[in-house]
Image: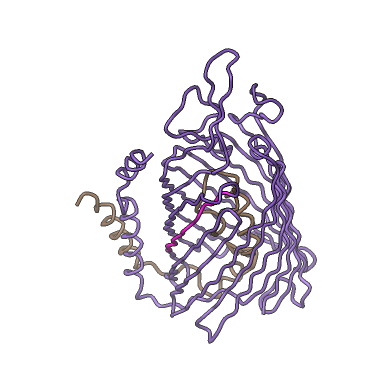
């Protein structure tokens, strides 16, 4: 039960947060919709760049994009 | 070897407690917020064609890549991608252990996204094929917009089944099973700022080392003979945790700045961090777009890595990707929009040219290419990465 304690705390915080209203209205999101604000504007180029890093570094995951295969033998 | 593998498997609780907690919290978020219905949007219909080139450390990799995404009935988006690596390698590993080689890797991926109100579900399949390595990856994912589209929650799972072969031994065939769990949050902070967080847990089991590479064992001092053992021996399991945090801010006059950081550690003892700073800006009335970035990466070595070993050990590696090193990279991308309206919404087409320079500086991996009986200076090398690509939105 102690293992689940953080989950209950998180759930309580989330439930309390449900009373919040969106503070940025849809008509206020012009700048957020700009392509330069995209988290991955060029998915193919981002995937390639992440592949370059992944094959030469020990770390992996939580990067620019996900991919399959190795290409490192 | 069998006993060692059993030892590692016994230490591996499944599913891990940390993962149970994260999944429970993520599911709770989805359940609590499912009542807030807001329309999510499928990815844009687009086509990309790219030529890529990597040149560094004695390795040249070039090839084409394609991506096509098309939506149907406003609820389904299908995607297909094709990617080629034509590799010529005379890297320090190859020159030290064997001779130069060429090979080709083909990767084909397909995916489908399905939109229902404020939720997008996706499935994907990727196959990667080389003459000595092939991989199949199956993926499932879901993303959900809440708080009026200000928060996007996502979670995913992918399963990989790899086969490791050896060109010099037709009887050699080993397997790797991979599991990857992903959680993500994108949060609108203000009219100008957005925050992103991601967490990945990756678990591998199987033959995880390179079948060609050897390690060095020194029998005595001060002028010892060197014994090569082939191949390396890695633990049969690996579990890693990676978490990243990023923020983007829209500056006035058509520019944006972003920062991103990542923390990584795994059961092999590797601790890594990276940091990236990016800047993007339009020129010429949104006809031109320039992106620049700087990235710093650093990692500690795996517990079973050594430049040389004084005695034989259960697990031994001399892979420079598992050594202690850091790297710096700087990049510049220039994009030109050749359609009316520039980089604005709607139909558009762009040409892009990207260049990145990377410099890797190893602390405990020395250069043995000239003389295998002496350990020289720590190794370092620079690499040039070029991408040329055309993108069309329709």
For the point 47% across and 23% down, which residue is it?
Answer: B311
Residue B203 position (above or below residue B63):
above
Residue B95 sits in quarter: top right
Q: Quadrant of the C terminus of chain B?
A: bottom right
Main SS of the magenta part reads: strand
Q: Which region is colored magenta?
A: B156-166
* B387 left or right of B109 in image: right
Residue B217 position (above or below residue B100):
above
- Residue B157 part of the magenta-drawn span: yes
Expressed as whole percent of the image width and height from the top left, the position of residue B87 reads 69, 52
For the point 53% across and 42% down, which residue is it?
Answer: B273
* B203 left or right of B43 in image: left
- Residue B211 part of the magenta-drawn span: no
B256 vs B158, nearest the viewer: B158
Expressed as whole percent of the image width and height from the top left, the position of residue B102 reads 70, 51
Residue B220 position (above or below residue B37):
above
Q: Colour of chain B?
A: purple
Expressed as whole percent of the image width and height from the top left, the position of residue A61 reads 50, 52
Q: Colour of chain A?
A: brown
Residue A20 position (above or below residue B393):
above
For the point 43% across and 74% down, which residue is it?
Answer: B119
* B166 left or right of B144 in image: right
For the point 69% across and 31% down, which residue is it?
Answer: B369
């Amino acid at each position: 039960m102690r293992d689940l304690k953080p989950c209950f705390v998180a759930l309580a915080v989330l439930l309390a947060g449900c009373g919040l209203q969106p503070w940025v209205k849809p008509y206020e999101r012009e700048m957020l919709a700009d392509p330069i604000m995209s988290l991955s504007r060029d998915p193919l180029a981002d995937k390639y760049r992440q592949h370059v890093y992944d094959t030469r570094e020990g770390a992996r995951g939580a990067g620019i994009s996900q991919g399959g295969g190795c290409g490192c033998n | 070897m069998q006993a060692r593998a059993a030892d590692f498997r016994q230490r591996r609780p499944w599913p891990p407690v940390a993962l149970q907690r994260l999944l429970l919290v993520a599911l709770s978020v989805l359940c609590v917020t499912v009542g807030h219905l807001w329309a999510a949007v499928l990815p844009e219909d687009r086509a990309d064609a790219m030529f890529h080139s990597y040149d560094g450390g004695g390795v040249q990799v070039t090839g084409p890549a394609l991506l096509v995404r098309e939506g149907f009935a406003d609820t389904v988006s299908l995607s297909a991608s094709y990617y080629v690596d034509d590799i010529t390698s005379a890297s320090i590993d190859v020159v030290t252990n064997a001779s130069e080689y060429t090979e080709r890797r083909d990767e084909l991926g397909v995916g489908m996204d399905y939109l229902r109100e404020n939720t997008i579900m996706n499935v994907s399949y990727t196959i990667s094929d080389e003459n000595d390595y092939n991989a199949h990856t199956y993926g499932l994912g879901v993303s959900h917009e809440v708080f009026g589209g200000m928060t996007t929650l996502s979670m995913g799972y992918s399963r990989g089944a790899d086969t490791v072969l050896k060109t010099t031994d037709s009887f050699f065939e080993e397997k790797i099973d991979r599991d990857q769990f992903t959680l993500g949050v994108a949060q609108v902070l203000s009219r100008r700022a957005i925050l992103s967080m991601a967490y990945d847990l990756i678990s591998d089991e199987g033959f995880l080392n390179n079948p060609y590479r050897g390690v060095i064992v020194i029998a005595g001092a001060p002028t010892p003979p060197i014994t090569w053992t082939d191949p390396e021996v890695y633990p049969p399991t690996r579990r890693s945790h990676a978490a990243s945090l990023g923020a983007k801010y829209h500056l006035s006059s058509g520019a944006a700045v972003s920062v991103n950081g990542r923390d990584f550690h795994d059961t092999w003892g590797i601790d890594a961090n990276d940091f990236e700073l990016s800047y993007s800006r339009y020129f010429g009335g949104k006809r031109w777009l320039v992106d620049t970035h700087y990235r710093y990466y650093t990692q500690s070595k795996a517990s079973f890595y050594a430049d040389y070993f004084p005695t034989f050990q259960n697990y031994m590696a001399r892979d420079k990707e598992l050594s202690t090193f850091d790297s710096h990279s700087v990049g510049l991308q220039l994009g030109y929009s050749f359609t009316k309206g520039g980089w604005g919404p709607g139909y558009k087409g762009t040409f892009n040219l990207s260049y990145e320079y990377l410099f890797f500086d190893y602390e405990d991996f020395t250069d043995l290419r000239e003389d295998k009986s002496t350990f020289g200076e720590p190794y370092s090398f620079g690499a040039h990465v070029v991408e040329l690509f055309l993108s069309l939105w329709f």
